[in-house]
Amino acid sequence: MTSPDFHVRLDLNNPVFQDQLFALQKLERHAALNTLKKIRQLTWQQVYSDQGLKWEKITSVKPPVGIDAIYSLRITQARRATAYRDGEFMRLLTIAPDHDAAYGKK
């Protein structure tokens, strides 16, 4: 059972997410890590309402089987990541090269 008072737990084990994170330039990589550090200190309710993260449901991409919905969030000033919620965990999937790419647009 999860509670809105629990802090978010991060799952960074997706190989695509890792490759994209490590490929970022130094300043952007540090900004992304600072965002991840911030998320770890938040509850899920705070993630949903945080204006800096802008947690948004992606309706233009069908989620894989077993996942209710995929969301985007601002991970750096110029980039968005995709993720989904799994209980207490935020499971990170990708870091998009630009804002539109996070939503499956070209």
Image: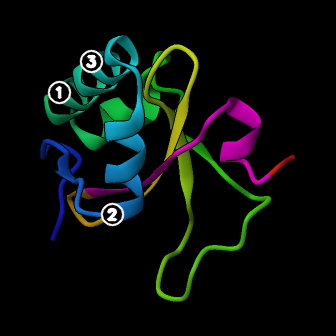
Q: Is residue 65 visible?
A: yes
Q: Residue at x 54, y 28 (%)?
A: 54
Spatial separation of the CA atoms under disc 3 and disc 2:
19 Å
Q: Which residues are magenta?
A: 90-104
Callout 3 amino acid: His
Spatial separation of the CA atoms under disc 3 and disc 1:
10 Å
In the depicted view, which residue is nearer to us: 54 or 16?
16
Left or right: where 32 falls relative to 66 = left
x and y, in percent, of residue 34 in the image: 23, 19
Callout 1 amino acid: Lys
Within 10 angstroms of label 2, few (less than 14), some, or many (20 or more) residues? few
Q: Earlier in the sequence, mark 3 or mark 1?
A: 3
Tally the marks.
3
For residue 33, which quarter of the picture?
A: top left
What residue is disc 2 on? 15
- Give residue 30's mark: 3
Work out whether 48 lies above or below 16.
Answer: above
Callout 2 amino acid: Pro
